[in-house]
Amino acid sequence: MIREIKKLKSEEFDVVIIGGGIHGVTIAREASLQGLKTALIEKNDFGSSTSANSLKVLHGGLRYLQHANYKRIRQSIRSRKVFQQVAPNLVSNVPFLVPTFGFGVRSKFVMKTAIKLYDIISADRNKNIPNDNFISNGKVLSKNEVVKILPGLQQNNLTGGAVWYESIANDSERLILQFVLDASDNGACIANYLKATGFIIENKSITAVKVKDELNNHEFEIRTKNIIVTAGPWLNEIYNSFVSNNTFNIPLTKAVNIVVNKGLFGNYAVGLEGTEEYKDRDAIIKRGKRLYFFVPLNNKTMIGTTYNKFDDAPDKLTITKSDLIEIIDEVNSIYPSLNLKFQDICFYHTGLLPMAEQKSPDDDIQPGKHSEIYDLEKTDGISGAYLIKSVKFTTAPSIAEDAVQMVLQKSGKKIKKTFVTSYNSNKKKEEIDLPYDVQKHLREIYGRNKYKIVSMINNNKQLAELVSNSPAVTIAEILYCIREEMAISLSDIILRRTGLGNLNIPSINTIIKIAKIMQNELKWDNSKLDYEIEKVKKIYSVLNNSLLETNN
Ligand SMILES: Cc1cc2nc3c(=O)[nH]c(=O)nc-3n(C[C@H](O)[C@H](O)[C@H](O)COP(=O)(O)OP(=O)(O)OC[C@H]3O[C@@H](n4cnc5c(N)ncnc54)[C@H](O)[C@@H]3O)c2cc1C
């Protein structure tokens, strides 16, 4: 897969997708599978914005029972299946535990009923997915069992716990990339670091997208019959470029998670009530305390999420030490015996989400609950332009089906069935003579594409040399990501291709080794090399920077 600038300049497309987060890439895959001539452009790297910053839970929809939203539960189950089918190596199942208390709405009886109901609604959840991804039924635990897992929990009124299974994206950045690779295999023309700067509208129809190549400032136009804008928090900005009075404004909330450098509750993800009350007008249970989730991943724990109002432009989003301390303080109030310290934080996630409407000033700040597709023909009389307001990573595949169907219906084209109905694991047997750690890393991160890296090593044994011990990353992998996966900057490799730095701080030695391989391959001069290294160091600068010297 290479940046297809020439084709983007010269050809006309059925649809250009603007924004390569999870929504853009799932739409690109779906549109190309449907036979639409598809282009996908991303102003930065794929999945480098909100989508890289989620808690990585691919919700099965149990939580929507409290909103009695059956449609959304089914949408979540269907979307989760798409993730399991596209990249089974990147999706795993984790038991989620929530303690139960007393006889009211948080009681064991109510939770047990909810879990049973969910198991019935999701009875087909394991149909057509790989066996390794099968999701078990939920269950309830006794008080003693819960105390064993959560010995520091305050036990007044504790009656036990409810357990259900959710999928998580082990590496959400690679999961996003797998959709890009699939779209490219299906013929989509794709480029990262290509920014949409404007649109050409003739006779009230979209005819082209104006773009700027962020690598050389070159500007050109991509001719197209339709656009789908999946720009995440930049939606307001792009929508307002179509309307004259700048009136479109979805308020944004800044969401933050932390990652701590230790497992906390064994293999369980745990939901614990925070200290502050919040209201949810749409739920059956209208009041409660916000749940904080502790999600285990690779011997670390992701904890979140906090939400605060954000009034600035999306490009101004930053993370501060006080954002991180807010979570540490809250966790230590909820579960004092954890005694977490700032130094335990090894990574963080922050992103901007549409905020739910505040019906009165004292309403809590919450993320919006509903994704939406705006058809500008209906709202502003411009045909061929669809803009997406997105609220969840999980439901992106289902939104993708809806958005592409809108384009197909308008163009009078037939809708094909693209949902996989029989799963074929297509296991390719090939001799691999590599250390166990390298094999494990390749299998977990690259799935079916690992053989491409293995064959590079078979052709040149020197490429098996490691640039990092944990994870065991080889030189071959870096070259593969540059040549076949559009990795262009050092941060693309560290954060979004190799799994080296998206849960952990990589060592400065590893960063420099990789930068030098990139310098050689991409012909960087020394000032570019220094710039790329400094840019990566800055990502971790809010954390305990001494870790840069000691890790891996
Ligand atoms: C802290 C946190 C925790 C979360 N946890 C979960 C969770 O556990 N489960 C879940 O399902 N969801 C979760 N979410 C929500 C989920 O991450 C988002 O809803 C989802 O990732 C949004 O995806 P997107 O593709 O719409 O937006 P983005 O990922 O923001 O993608 C938009 C892309 O558009 C690009 N772009 C913008 N303007 C242009 C332009 N002019 N030209 C070209 N490209 C452009 C941007 O660079 C960006 O890459 C969480 C979010 C946060 C912040």
Image (spheres, rainbow, N blue to C red):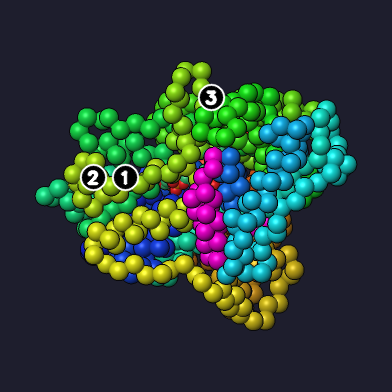
Per the image, the residue denoted by label 1 is: 374
Residue at (42% x, 63% y) in the render: 29
Labels 1 & 3 near each other (Cβ < 8 A): no
What kind of residue is marked 3? Asp
Labels 2 & 1 near each other (Cβ < 8 A): yes
- Residue 322 drawn at (x, y percent): 61, 25
Q: Could you classify mark 1 by the number of other residues whose Cα lies within 10 Å: few (under 14), some (14-19), or many (20 or more)?
A: some
The dot on residue 10 is none
Q: Is residue 527 visible?
A: no
Residue at (51% x, 18% y) in the render: 362
Per the image, the residue denoted by label 3 is: 364
User: Which stretch did the figure color magenta?
Assistant: 67-93
Residue at (44% x, 35% y) in the render: 354
Q: Could you classify mark 2 by the number of other residues whose Cα lies within 10 Å: few (under 14), some (14-19), or many (20 or more)?
A: few
Per the image, the residue denoted by label 2 is: 378
Residue 181 highlighted magenta (yes or no): no
- Residue 148 drawn at (x, y percent): 87, 42
Viewer-closest of 307 and 358 = 358
Q: CA distance from mark 2 to mark 3?
A: 32 Å
Give the left or right position of residue 321, taking residue 191 as reference.
Answer: right
Name the N-terminal-most of marks 2 and 3: 3
What kind of residue is marked 1? Tyr
- Indicate whether 233 appears above or below 220: above
What kind of residue is marked 2? Lys
Viewer-closest of 72 and 396 = 72
Q: Is label 1 in a helix, a strand or a loop? A: strand
Q: CA distance from mark 2 to mark 1?
A: 8 Å
Give the left or right position of residue 214, taking residue 290 as reference.
Answer: left
Name the N-terminal-most of marks 1 and 3: 3
Question: Splitting the image into 4 quarters, where does residue 13 fall?
Answer: bottom left
